[in-house]
Each structure stands twice: as C-alpha cells, then as structure tokens.
Amino acid sequence: MDSIGFAPHDHTSCIQDGIAAVDAQCRAEGLQFTPVRRRVLEILLQEHRALGAYEILDRLREEGLGSQPPVAYRALDFLVKNGFAHKIERLNAFIACTHPGESHAPVFLICRACDAVAEAQREPTQGQLGQAARDAGFVIERAVIEAEGLCPKCQGKPAA
C-alpha cells in the first residue's frame, strides 16, 4: 500500500507534477481545465490536508477569482468527477488525488490532531471486505475507506 502525505518529499515538484498530469489528461480527453479549476487544484495540492469548499472559496475571493459558493463547488465537482480530487466524507472536505488519471481505490488516512490526509491505495475486492462481499453475493463497484488516527508528526507530540 503506497501513500503520500506523511512522508517527506519535494513538495514543489509534487504540486507541479500534479498540475501537469491533470493538464495533460484534460487536453487528451478534451476537458476544459479553466483557470478557476486549475487554481482550485493548486490550492488542494499546496496542502496535504483536506480543505472545505468555503476555505477554498476564501482563497479564490482573495485572488479575485470568484466570491460566490457555486464558483468553488463547480470547480470541485469537475475535479472530483474526473478523478483529480476526492471528497473526504468524514471531514466534508476535499483533497487532491495523488494518482490522477489512474484507476484506483483510495484509502484515506486522516490525522485527528492536525487534519493531515494521506492517500493510499487498496483493492476493496481483496481482504476481509472483499470476502464479506463475495460471501453475500455482492459485487463491490466503489468503496471509500477513511481511517482516523495520528500521523507520524503528531504521534510524538504530548497530548493537549
């Protein structure tokens, strides 16, 4: 299971590579990667924590890119629909996909102390969930797994 978000990495390259991958996929599929959609993705890539739509809207407003909630929600809908971002249900927030353009089943590791989120991959048809589905005669088409705990950085901090 690969993950990113808690491990040290070249964050500048992370952002640039993410934008480049999405830009290339949009061109290949004839999708409109508008300036607002691009900026929303950049905002999501700048942090490895989930952001709410209103946090994103505040940043867009500061930059003069829109001040009404539909601006942020339309951009987020586009990014999620096309697999460039994910909605973290537990937080009612969004995070950039670390594997844009790849078919995958993400598992989200959410730090309860700092709200950092790492995306890992796991095949839901395997393991106990897959076995339970097979035993019930059920075919899994989509699964969102969110696990809450402490990231490596927060594990070493004294409890508040």
Image (tube, grey):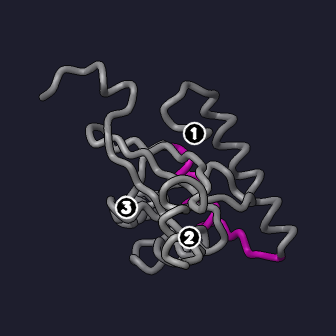
> As drawn, is 27 to the left or to the right of 115?
right
Q: Nearer the viewer, mark 3 or mark 1?
A: 1
Gap in angstroms between the C-alphas marked 1 and 2: 27 Å
In this rendered view, identify the residue nearer to me: 139 or 149: 139
The answer to whether the residues at label 1 and label 2 have Cβ atoms under 8 Å apart is: no
Gap in angstroms between the C-alphas marked 3 and 2: 36 Å
Identify whether 146 is placed above or below 2.
Answer: below
In this rendered view, identify the residue nearer to me: 63 or 6: 6
Judge whether residue 85 is colored magenta. Answer: no
Disc 2 target residue? 134
In this rendered view, identify the residue nearer to me: 103 or 47: 103
Give the residues drawn in magenta, as a range: 30-46
Dominant secondary structure (helix, strand or loop) of the stretch shown in magenta: helix
For the residue carrying disc 2, how many other residues have a C-alpha within 10 Å: few (<14), some (14-19), or many (20+)? some
Q: Which residue is drawn at 68% across and 70% down?
A: 34
Q: What element carries label 2?
A: helix
Gap in angstroms between the C-alphas marked 3 and 1: 22 Å
Q: Which residue is drawn at 57% across and 38% down?
A: 4
Q: Where is residue 121 in the image (x, y as percent from the top left)?
A: 60, 49
Identify whether 149 is placed above or below 100.
Answer: above
Disc 1 target residue? 3
- Tag shown at residue 120: none
* Amino acid tagged 1: Ser
Disc 3 target residue? 52
Q: Which residue is drawn at 56% across and 46% down?
A: 120
Query: Where the N terminus falls, by quadrant?
Result: top right
* Amino acid tagged 2: Arg
